[in-house]
Amino acid sequence: MSLSSTSPPSLPSEILGVIAEALSFEDWFACILVNKEWSTEFTSVFYRSITLLTSRQCSLFHGTLLESPQLGYCIRKICIRAPDPPSMMLKHLPELCPFLTHLDLSKDIRGHIHDLPLLPLSFASLSSLTYLRVTSNLNDFSWLETLSQLNFLSIQWVGTKWSMALMTNIHTWCPMLNTLQLVIKSTNMATNPVPLFSSPLPRINKDIATNRQQLPDNDNASNGNSYNVSLTLKSANIYFPVELTHPLVAGWLNFCATKYPNLIQLTMGLEIGHQNHRSNPFNTNSNIKNHLVSSMELFSQSCPHIKSINLENFSEYYRLLQCINRHERQLEQLSIRDPYELVAWSLFSGTTESSRHSLSKLSIASFRDVLPHIEYGLVQHLQTLPNLSSLTLTECMNRISIDRLLYAAPQLKHLCLVATYLVTTSGIPLVEQHDGLEILEFKRNSVTQLVLKYINYHCHRLRQLIIERTSIPPLFGDVKQQSHISFANLNLEKVSLHSVSRKTVVPDSDSFVGVKVNTNDSFKWYHTGKDNDRNNKSGDVLGYKAIPYSDLPVRENNNALRLLVECRTLRHLYFNDTRLII
């Protein structure tokens, strides 16, 4: 019997393109090595979305496009994270990538090259842009006039003085804008800003807010200082320094109330400069606070479609939630990150009464020290949210028992714990199984073997585990000092490990990962350490390859991580963003 080699199937380029977009990077690279036809198609798919992290990557990318201009026609998205990309590359970008739709420039780009109007870019050739993230220090936003197709716009404004009048014509130039994000770096407001409206703030027409049937008058729309609503904008995000808290918070809420009747998502964040800043910027005279409350009331009344609120370092969050609750708005997502006020669960529960049955995603962050009874308040509040499916707890320093947490939220599918430590309670678990939990994340954490054992026995629906910058201490009394992730009862889709160590403070000098997928199999070992240059270079981009057990160092290294991962089934395992070939 002779063995004959079989060639891969010849598929239409459209089908290969669909397949390529659904593959991981490692699988994509394996396909590009099959034959010339697949190489051509999968290469063009690779160039559809480009991310450049260093100046060298930018130079190589620019040289590749100059040598092979046809690749530029495939590019749709470019994300430049390098702090100092070559100016010539940015100058040639419109010519080399004429069909660019997504341009994301890092806010950390040095010098003035990050300012698009200062580059000899032809905005006519970039008129197909739908996504733009850029930094600008110009006195106005008139450079947006030719970008009428934008639906996402993020501007980091580093000008001298900010005025809300800069926002006057932005929706006239970009009528299809769906998401707007402003990051204001200036610490001064214009002394005599041009008034945004020539008359007192108008009432929102009910037909516009609810039925979207009535449009603003064309003559008024052309007047920069007249009332002109935007019916397309659904997400508004603004971040500003603490020095501009008083004038900007009320002004931005009024602006959203009068311009965005169909707003769904609102984000407001104060940049407090450093994490130990504990003074409340809203602790001022009563007139300013009353004006702020009036703006919150107008916003809650004028935005009936609001579904998501994200407040960062915003100490008056409960006042805004009270206004939203008073107008019976039903929120689906709520995120609170506040260093000034500790989350009082009794008050928090009262201000979210109208969203009790609609809230599906909740994120809470607290910077305060350990306080008693915080677990009890959290559990009591979670029991009032029957449809909660995603929960993120950040820097809740108290230890929270995992069984009480999952018992209080039986519908929870996604749980993310950032610097929030889990424990297990002694005695019989409250429930035998938690069938809802599918995704579990630990970040900046320490996970004990008892917690992992509880997950293995009681979370049978778990499909994805993410562990980042987290220590997994070895079993007590283990002579080899090996860390264990033992999920022998679970069928996992993906396990992602990043910056995992044995100890919280001491980094590991080297690391070895042992993987056991089936109870009848033996462990496969992978050398994933920092000093493993040979493996990183010769292990190719398909991922880490298993090494024989005999290649493991005979002498135990006390500073080396030995991590054992055991699952019933496992499809993908990543260590520091590199796949382990199972």
Image (cartoon, helix red, strand yellow):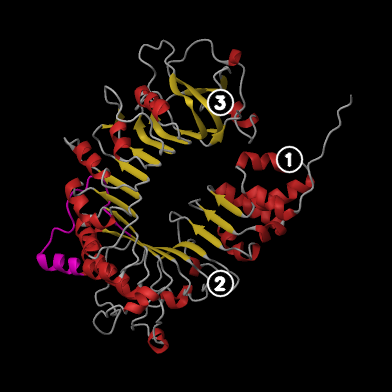
- Is residue 382 at least partly visible in the picture? yes
Q: Amino acid at mark 3?
A: Asn
Residue at the image point whose x is 24% and y is 74% from the top: 191
Q: Nearer the viewer, residue 476 or 99?
A: 476
Looking at numbered disc 2 in the image, what kind of residue is underneath it? Answer: Phe
Tag 2 residue:
123
When the figure is inspected, residue 564 is found, relative to residue 209, above or below; the finding is above
Who comes first in sequence, dot 1 or dot 3?
1
The local secondary structure at tag 2 comes to loop
In the displayed structure, 455 sits above or below 218; it is above
User: Amino acid type of disc 1?
Assistant: Leu
Q: Quadrant of residue 538?
A: top right
- Is residue 272 a member of the stretch shown in magenta? yes
- The alpha-carbon separation of the residues under discs 1 and 3 comes to 25 Å
Q: Is residue 42 left or right of residue 90?
A: right
Distance (Cα) linking label 3 and label 2: 47 Å
Alpha carbon distance from label 2 to label 1? 38 Å
Q: Residues within 10 Å of mark 3 (few under 14, many from 20)?
A: few
Image quadrant holding the N terminus, namely top right
Sooner in the amino-acid sequence: mark 3 or mark 2: 2
Q: Which residue is farthest bottom? A: 219
Drawn side of residue 289 relative to residue 557, left or right: left
Residue 179, given in percent of the width and then of the height, sits at: 43, 64
What residue is rendered at 43% in x and 56% in y? 107
Confirm whether the magenta stretch covers residue 158.
Answer: no
Q: Give the residues drawn in magenta, as a range.
A: 267-294
- Closest to the observer, 346 or 167: 346
Q: What residue sits right under mark 3 in the picture?
A: 532
Viewer-nearest residue: 212 or 12: 212
Which numbered dot is residue 33?
1
